[in-house]
Image (tube, rainbow, N blue to C red):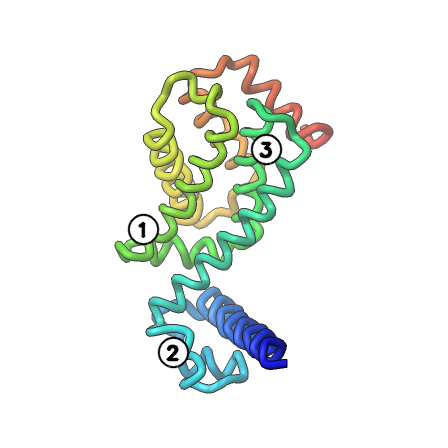
Amino acid sequence: MPYRMTERGEKRREERRGQIVAAAQRLFAVQGYEATSMQQVVAEAGTSIGSCYFYFRNKEDLLRAVIEEVNAAIGNEIDAAIAQVPIGPARLAAAIDAGVRSLSRRAAVMRLVLAESANPALRETVSSIYVARVQRFFETAPELLRGLDRDLVAYAWEGALFNVLRTAVASGEKAEAEVLSTFLIRWNMRALGLSEDVIEQAIIEVRGDRI
């Protein structure tokens, strides 16, 4: 019986924490990080300030949790998109395509992350999540590296992704996810030394009847 009580209590704590993170994500995306107070977050979440500080030391800690939650959701969508694609160039293209589309569907959160990326600690959080995912991908398909250093490739791709997204957001124009995705697929796969024929075939396999 005590074990079951502890299990139920843990579930309630996780649910309460999730409610706070979800409320913060909504408010940060609409109002901006700086304009949102912890009091507004707890009011939106329907909890207390004491409960909020039980889970998060400060607002920056809460923002980090929001970023981690969003990245986990994006990661799940990427995993689902590539699950049925054989290891090789097409899977690489599918991962890039799914990631860009997933980010584009979260435009408000993307703008928030890009705006706050000047904060070194938060920038490192975002960078480390993305880099780790690229590293894991190439652990399953090392032949695609063609002798290149996996970690250098991961950091180069991370820089390319965020600079392209930052430019798209700063332009003030609605960038088509497919345009951004196609550019990044070609750019990243050319950097690996893959041939144009291989790259275009990978895009066709991923896009199917969308092109």
* Circle 1: residue type: Glu
Instruction: Compare marks 1 and 2 and give the one earlier in the sequence.
Output: 2
Q: Residues within 10 Å of mark 3 (few under 14, many from 20)?
A: many
Q: Residues within 10 Å of mark 1 (few under 14, many from 20)?
A: few
Residue at label 3? 94
Q: Residue at x 51, y 43 (%)?
A: 175
Asked if 122 appears above or below 61 in the picture, the reply is: above
Instruction: Compare marks 2 and 3 and give the one earlier in the sequence.
Output: 2
Residue 181: assigned label: none
Q: Residue at x 52, y 48 (%)?
A: 103
Does residue 37 appear left or right of residue 89 in this picture?
A: left
Instruction: Compare marks 3 and 1 and give the one earlier in the sequence.
Output: 3
Does residue 174 appear left or right of residue 207 in this picture?
A: left
Report the Cα–Cα distance between label 3 and label 1: 25 Å
Report the Cα–Cα distance between label 1 and label 2: 23 Å
* Circle 3: residue type: Ala
